[in-house]
């Protein structure tokens, strides 16, 4: 699962005026469209590439440095309704008397959303 290339793909390879394929950027500061008078400035290309790599780095950093919150209990196959996290911690708690059954608590390890389910 690759993250979608955010603003990298957008309109870099196609002329926004006529839609024809632009040649790859060369040493000159512009990429002229072969069909119309449009010329793409390579400065714009670089700006977009930088923008893309910054977003990518932030994504990587966020993934690597997630502080793991301390959650009690084992993970069960349950999707967090708030953030979509797969797998929620659960623990049960006995209510006042035995014939009232027990309540199951599901806690999302990512956003700490908590759900309660009576059984
Ligand atoms: Zn064109
Ligand atoms: Zn969540």
Image: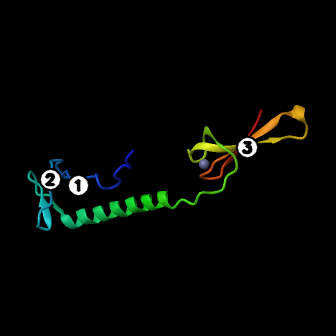
Residue labelled 2 has its Cβ within 8 Å of some atom of ligand 1: yes
- Looking at the rendered image, the disc whose residue lies closer to the viewer, 2 or 3, is 3
Counting residues from the start of the chain, the first of labels 2 and 3 encountered is: 2
Q: Which residue is mark 1?
A: 12
Quadrant where the C terminus sits is top right
Crowd class of label 3 (few under 14; some 14 to 19; many from 20; radius 10 Å):
some
Badge 2 vs badge 1, beta-carbon distance below 8 Å? yes
The answer to which of 20 and 4 lies nearer the viewer is 4
Quadrant where the N terminus sits is top left
Q: Which residue is mark 2?
A: 22
Q: Is residue 28 left or right of residue 114?
A: left
The answer to which of 96 and 22 lies nearer the viewer is 96
- Looking at the rendered image, the disc whose residue lies closer to the viewer, 1 or 3, is 3
Counting residues from the start of the chain, the first of labels 1 and 3 encountered is: 1
Picture quadrant where residue 33 is located? bottom left
Mark-to-mark CA distance, 2 and 1? 8 Å
């Amino acid at each position: 699962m690759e993250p979608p290339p955010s603003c990298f793909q957008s309109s870099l390879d196609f002329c926004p005026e006529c839609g024809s394929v632009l040649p790859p950027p060369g040493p000159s500061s512009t990429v002229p469209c072969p069909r119309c008078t449009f010329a793409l400035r390579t400065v714009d290309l670089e700006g977009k590439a930088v923008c893309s790599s910054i977003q990518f780095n932030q994504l990587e950093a966020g993934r690597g440095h997630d502080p793991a919150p301390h959650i009690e209990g084992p993970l069960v196959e349950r999707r967090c309704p708030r953030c979509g996290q797969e797998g929620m911690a659960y623990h049960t708690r006995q209510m006042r008397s035995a014939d009232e059954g027990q309540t199951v608590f599901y806690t999302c390890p990512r956003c700490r959303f908590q759900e309660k389910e009576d059984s």
